[in-house]
Image: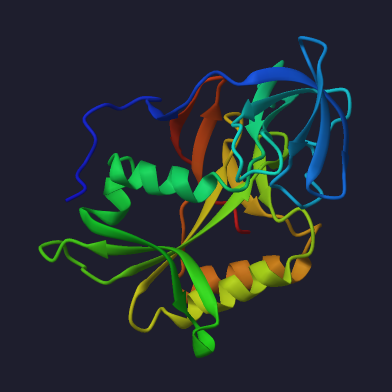
Amino acid sequence: MIERALIEGGPPVIKFPPLKEGVLLKRYKRFLADIELDSGEIVTAHCANTGPMTGVLNVGGRVRVSHIPSPKRKLPWSWEQAEVESANGGKCWAGINTSLPNKLIALAIEQGHLYEHFGSISEIRREVRYGKDLRSRIDLLLIPEISDKPSKEIYLEVKNTTWAEGSLGLFPDTVTTRGQKHLEELIGVLQFSRAVLVPCLSRSDVKAFAPGDSADKRYGELFRKAIQMGVEVIPCCFAYQIDQITWEGTRPVIAG
């Protein structure tokens, strides 16, 4: 059973060996980035984020990479974080590895940080087929404890969010027909389950979340429709450090 965490106030959600720092030289072919490490070595890192990376793709800017050599990997280096201008002044780090948010949200639930929203969760299932003709996959399907009320299953879709205007986090940063479909699929499960959209705010300076209307007007329209129909939106904020990622709480939604 997954219960409320005892530690509160910016606790680490995940820890890892210290990342290596360097400077971004270029990003190309969507999946590749050349980075000059502080040691002077130039490496090619895998870039899991295939989108435009608005506001976090800064050639000449500071970045952090992980090194995981393995015969199963084409590249031992992965681009993990980018230093950006902070809405609070100075700099902060943003998490650009899009393979991490689902794991972070699952860990936050397991550690009890979202207990007030979901209660006790007995099981978290990943990539479960759902929607029209079962052609979509939900990021996380939460199975509540039977003793909790309401005890409906919770369909939870996660969206990595690094684009910000001031302290306002925005998603998406480009037209996303896939994201539009996800909103429609979430609306579709409301008759028998809870449906939740979780913008994973992967930078600690974000104070609120809104749909990125200027990038995808249709997504913004569907976002507001989804809320009106009963889809819940719970933006979750994390701070990215050189050897850990910490929980920074939830943020309000601005949908007007």
Q: Residue furthest bottom?
A: 133
At 49% from the left edge and 84% from the top edge, which residue is drawn?
134
Residue 54 at least partly seen: no
At 70% from the left edge and 44% from the top edge, which residue is drawn?
74
Q: Residue furthest left?
A: 147
Q: Residue furthest top?
A: 39
Visual colour scheme: rainbow
238 sits left or right of 191 in the view = right
Image vertical order of residue 189 relative to residue 168, above or below: below
**Residue 170 in the image, given as x and y percentages of width and height:** 68, 49
At 50% from the left edge and 21% from the top edge, which residue is drawn?
17
Q: Which residue is more in the foreground, 112 or 107?
A: 107
**Residue 76 in the image, given as x and y percentages of width and height:** 67, 34
At 61% from the left edge and 32% from the top edge, which residue is drawn?
69
**Residue 146 in the image, given as x and y percentages of width and height:** 13, 66
Q: Which residue is more in the foreground, 71 or 47?
A: 71
Q: Quadrant of the C terminus?
A: bottom right
Picture mark count = 0
Quadrant in the picture for residue 73: top right
Q: Which residue is more in the foreground, 215 or 14?
A: 14
Image vertical order of residue 136 relative to residue 127, above or below: below
Image vertical order of residue 4 relative to residue 9, above or below: below
